[in-house]
Image: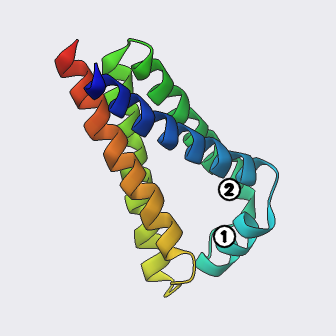
Amino acid sequence: MPVFVLCAVVTVAAIAANVYAAWADFTRGTVAVANANKVGVPTSWLPMLGTLKTAGALGLLLGLLGVPYIGVAAAIGLVLFFLGAIVTHLRAHEHRFLLATVGYLLLAIAALAAAITLQAIR
């Protein structure tokens, strides 16, 4: 049971972080707009990026609720999303928001490990 609790805590943290990031994208929050401008991403893309983060969070939730393959797929999608975001930051020589993006990537990797673990213990 402790393994399940640890996996659940990690997954819920990743869900919360992505819901927050998606909310910032959908509401065109100051940080989201500034970040997009610094890395050369059109602000018109923010709703699409928010939708991808929301889909990832919902997939992680489904994985936690018992649909393991969806959870693993969502975690893989978020890992790829944030790897792309890191590449975008590096190509733009923008390092101010890079640390936060690495944090999101690490959460996505932890959620992937949790999703795989949950699939194995079920």
Name above or below for residue 62 compared with residue 15: above
Residue 120 horizontal side relative to residue 28, left or right: left
Amino acid type at mark 2: Trp
**Figure label count:** 2
Kind of element beneath mark 2: helix
Q: In which quarter of the image is the C terminus?
A: top left
- What is the crowding at mark 2: few (fewer than 14 residues within 10 Å), some, or many (at least 20)? few
Percent across and percent down for residue 6 are: 34, 33
Which mark, by number, is residue 74? none
Which mark, by number, is residue 45? 2
Percent across and percent down for residue 35 are: 66, 72
- Going by the picture, which residue comes out furthest to the left? 120
Residue 116 horizontal side relative to residue 77, left or right: left
Name above or below for residue 42 compared with residue 90: above
Task: Tell me, yes or no, if residue 3 can be seen here.
Answer: yes
Q: Give the colouring mode of the picture.
A: rainbow
Q: Are marks 2 and 1 in contact (CB under 8 Å)?
A: yes
Kind of element beneath mark 1: helix
Tag 1 residue? 36
Marks 2 and 1, how far apart in space?
A: 9 Å
| Residue shown at 39% from the left, 41% from the top | 77
Q: Which of marks 2 and 1 is in front?
A: 1
- What is the crowding at mark 1: few (fewer than 14 residues within 10 Å), some, or many (at least 20)? some
Name above or below for residue 83 compared with residue 36: above
Percent across and percent down for residue 97 are: 57, 75
Q: In which quarter of the image is the N terminus?
A: top left
Amino acid type at mark 1: Ala
| Residue shown at 40% from the left, 71% from the top | 87
| Residue shown at 44% from the left, 52% from the top | 81
Task: Tell me, yes or no, if residue 76 can be seen here.
Answer: no
Q: Which of marks 2 and 1 is nearer the N terminus?
A: 1
